Image (cartoon, grey):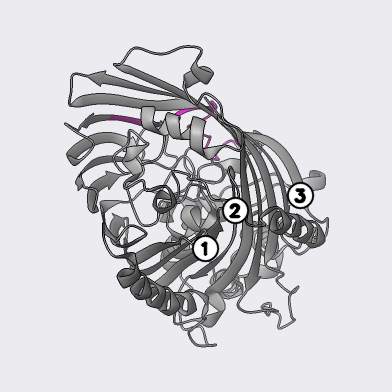
């Protein structure tokens, strides 16, 4: 039997140290990250969108496979998805035109569309970066 | 919606008025249970429970005692065979700031049969499989060139592995499909575990894992690769390891790391966790922090993910407590972070039955993103979610 009274103060201190680290925000107001797909896909899209029940290779919800850099880029910029109210199918991303890109409206829940991801919105700066990528031509670099 | 969740949390707080404490295997320190595998067949815990776990379930964990055996004790399998069933059905209401308001859904989460076949004293085969729930319907109305699901049916085996383990205490090796042991082993598969740590639902990897489990410490190391059969999870391959050391009878500290490589991405994770039980307050505190450096193509980035939770065991069969989560895609950019807080109530009224109510609010670190046209976009509200589910375990 160990002496619990000796070790618990250490853990309490550990928690006191950890809790602020969990809660505190850090970083700059300026986003210096490159608006390129080789960052956007693995850092933002894959962990949040290519989940098992959604846009994984296995399920490919709405005909979109976002599980890799190549497949994700093809799914968003080349393949068409059915749009509501009988409008002509078109890709989720229109290079150079973020305002007409349905993907961006879904990320921000604007224009009356459903938000994606449906359970946890992306961080605002991550959506801004995706917008910049689209504005820059939505290339696969 | 928020008022509803707050009301539920208030009710939970009233129910949680301290009376007496009881044990629960999730909280090893409150019951004197030393290891996760004291109740589970898996060396790092989780999944099918063994005879000791069933006894605990029947006698010490539920509000009203009963028979914790398979099928309430109506059928006792031979010693070489262990059976179990895990079924869950849920109601969820999620509000993420859409004009149409909150989404509500009722859906089956899972219906799994669990089987363990012992082959002699040291070898065993474990299989968990069944129906997989899916809250979102998979659209069939897509372009002819679009990728089609490779996992169209709803049957899946989330775990199947062969294990060599001469004894519960000591070394083991297992190979197959399961989650690599990593960090805090929380009972619920919350967003923090799924998204921030990368252990998504049904995204178990294929692994060769080994380790040593002692009463005082345990160590697990896993070589993992992607799900090559169903392509449900991440495509990376690499190594994961964790070490946990008990400090006295009511505390533990641990370290974990994970290295995964795929395409042009190298992703690392380094973290630590701690848990301690305060006997007088009948409260378990758990905390974990992970720093996640990565190289995405030519871009270096460092993310962070953390969890802090408290669980109070006020009366037999009930556990309740708040939690907070923090994540940030890149610590150099403030606007990439989000915070979340919530509370959870678990009630085990009778052996084999669990009722769970969970509320979660997310708040963004930055507001009013600006569109390319320079106009302020709709304010990002974060999101809120209420999850209620019933868990039947046979």
Give SS at disc 3.
Answer: strand
Residue occupying the point 68% across, 44% down: B388
Give percent across and percent down for residue B196: 47, 60
State whether discs 3 and 1 lie on one chain.
yes
Tell me if residue B158 is in the magenta stretch: yes
Please name whichever residue, B260 or B90, is drawn nearer the observer in this view of the structure.
B90
Residue wearing tag 2 = B314
Query: Image point 45% across, 40% down: which residue?
Result: B232
Residue B103's disc is 3
Q: Main secondary structure of the magenta part?
A: loop
Q: Where residue B166 sits in the image (x, y, percent)?
A: 16, 31
- Residue A123 position in % (x across, y down): 58, 70
The one nearer the camera, B42 or A136, is B42
The quadrant in which residue B341 appears is: bottom right
Q: Decide which of tag 3 and tag 2 comes sooner along the chain.
A: 3
In this rendered view, identify the residue nearer to me: B68 or B179. Answer: B68
Is A59 above or below relative to B124?
below
N-terminal of the pair, mark 3 or mark 1, is 3
Do the residues at pointers 3 and 2 share their chain? yes
Residue A97 in view here: no
Secondary structure of residue under mark 1: strand
Q: Is B46 located above or below residue B283 in the figure?
A: above
What chain does badge 2 belong to? B
Quadrant where the image shows the N terminus of chain B: bottom right
Q: In the drawing, does residue A130 fall left or right of residue B258? A: right
- State which chain disc 3 sits on: B
**Residue segment shown in magenta:** B144-161
């Amino acid at each position: 039997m160990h002496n619990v009274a000796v070790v618990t103060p250490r853990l309490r201190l550990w928690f006191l140290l950890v809790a602020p680290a969990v809660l505190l925000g850090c970083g700059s107001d300026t986003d210096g990250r490159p608006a390129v797909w080789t960052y956007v896909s693995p850092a933002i899209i894959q962990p949040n969108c290519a989940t098992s029940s959604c846009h994984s290779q296995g399920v490919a919800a709405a005909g979109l496979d976002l599980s890799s850099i190549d497949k994700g880029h093809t799914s968003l910029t080349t393949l068409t998805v059915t749009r509501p109210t009988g409008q002509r199918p078109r890709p989720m991303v229109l290079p150079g035109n973020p305002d007409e890109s349905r993907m961006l409206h879904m990320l921000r829940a604007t224009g009356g569309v459903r938000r994606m991801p449906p359970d946890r919105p992306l961080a605002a700066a991550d959506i801004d970066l995706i917008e910049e990528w689209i504005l820059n031509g939505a290339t696969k670099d | 919606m928020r008022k509803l969740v707050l009301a539920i949390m208030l009710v939970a707080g009233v129910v949680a008025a301290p009376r007496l404490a009881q044990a629960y295997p999730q909280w090893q320190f409150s019951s004197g249970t030393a290891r996760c595998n004291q109740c589970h067949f898996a060396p790092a815990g989780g999944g099918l429970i063994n005879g000791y776990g069933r006894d605990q379930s029947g006698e010490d964990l539920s509000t009203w005692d009963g028979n914790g055996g398979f099928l309430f004790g109506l059928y006792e399998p031979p010693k070489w065979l262990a059976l179990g069933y895990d079924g869950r059905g849920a109601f969820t209401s999620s509000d993420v700031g859409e004009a149409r308001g909150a989404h509500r859904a009722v859906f089956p989460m899972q219906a799994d049969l669990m089987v363990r076949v012992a082959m002699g004293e040291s070898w065993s085969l474990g299989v968990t499989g069944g129906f997989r729930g899916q809250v979102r319907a998979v659209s069939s109305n897509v372009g002819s060139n679009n990728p089609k699901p490779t996992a169209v049916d709803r049957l899946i085996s989330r775990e199947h592995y062969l294990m060599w383990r001469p004894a519960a205490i000591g070394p083991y090796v297992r190979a197959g499909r399961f989650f690599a042991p990593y960090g805090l082993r929380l009972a619920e598969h919350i967003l923090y575990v799924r998204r921030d740590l990368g252990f998504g639902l049904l995204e178990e990897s294929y692994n060769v894992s080994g380790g040593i489990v002692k009463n005082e410490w345990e160590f697990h190391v896993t070589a993992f690769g992607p799900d090559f059969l169903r392509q449900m999870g991440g495509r990376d391959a690499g190594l994961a390891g964790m070490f946990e050391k008990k400090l006295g009878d009511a505390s533990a500290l641990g370290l974990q790391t994970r290295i995964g490589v795929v395409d042009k991405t190298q992703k690392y994770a380094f973290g630590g966790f701690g848990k301690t039980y305060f006997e007088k307050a009948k409260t378990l505190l758990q905390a974990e922090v992970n720093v996640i450096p990565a190289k995405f193509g030519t871009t270096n980035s460092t993310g962070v993910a953390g969890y802090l939770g408290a669980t109070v065991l006020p009366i037999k069969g009930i556990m309740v407590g708040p939690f907070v989560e923090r994540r940030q895609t890149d610590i150099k950019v403030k606007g990439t972070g989000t915070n979340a807080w919530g509370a959870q109530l678990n009630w085990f009224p009778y052996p084999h039955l669990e009722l769970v109510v969970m509320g979660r609010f997310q708040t963004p670190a930055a507001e009013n993103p600006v569109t390319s046209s320079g106009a302020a976009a709709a304010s990002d509200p974060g999101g809120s979610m209420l999850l209620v589910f019933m868990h039947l375990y046979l």
